[in-house]
Amino acid sequence: MRTLLLVLHLIGVAAWLGGNFTQMAVMPGLDRAGGVVAVAWHQASGRMAQIYYSVAGTVVFLTGVGLVLDGPYEFSHAFVSIGFAVVIIGGVMGVAFFAPTSRAAVAAHEHGDASAIGKVRQRFAIGAAIDTALVIFTVYAMVAKLGV
């Protein structure tokens, strides 16, 4: 059972990071294309924030709980606490930051507001960098078993 939980946990983390890396690689070009291309991209990105990342985060969270309950580690270990904190932060960022930022990008592109597009692009890039850095740090914390 533990092996299955670990495999699913890793798949959830891979989905999360893979989604982040894909968005950071693809978004600039689609955003610069403007018009219906940019609007469609930001609509899809908003759906990813609400659905895709919610599923990935839920898988990571539930399998993380299962791994702690079925293993030698405790919820009080630092690496476990870091993991749960980052999943919660990621969930909040998805709903409170990425989804509304995607809606703002759609509106900016629909109105052809170059200034707003630039500001939204910068906000999204900073948020994506923070989210990705947190997940990468968490992977390090897990592998190093910080606090054990």
Image (cartoon, helix red, strand yellow):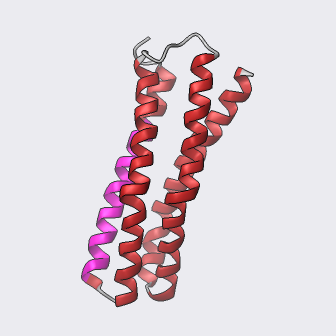
Q: Quarter holding the C terminus? A: top left
Q: Is residue 18 magenta?
A: no
The relative height of residue 105 versus residue 55 in the rendered view (above or below) is: below
The relative height of residue 67 versus residue 148 in the rendered view (above or below) is: below
Per the rendered image, the range of residues in magenta is 115-136
**Chief secondary structure of the magenta portion:** helix
The relative height of residue 30 versus residue 146 in the rendered view (above or below) is: below
Q: Quarter holding the N terminus? A: top right
Q: Nearer the viewer, residue 31 or 50?
A: 50
Determine whether, in the image, residue 121 is placed left or right of residue 16.
Answer: left
Q: Is residue 118 magenta?
A: yes
Q: Nearer the viewer, residue 65 or 123?
A: 65
Determine whether, in the image, residue 136 is placed left or right of residue 67.
Answer: left
**x then y, percent, for residue 79:** 44, 22
**x then y, percent, for residue 92:** 40, 48
Q: Nearer the viewer, residue 122 or 101?
A: 101
Residue at image position (69%, 32%) is: 7
Q: How many numbered callouts?
A: 0
Determine whether, in the image, residue 94 is placed left or right of residue 18.
Answer: left
Residue at image position (45%, 88%) is: 35
Residue 59 lies in quadrant = top right
**x then y, percent, for residue 95:** 42, 56
Residue at image position (53%, 13%) is: 73
**x then y, percent, for residue 106:** 41, 78
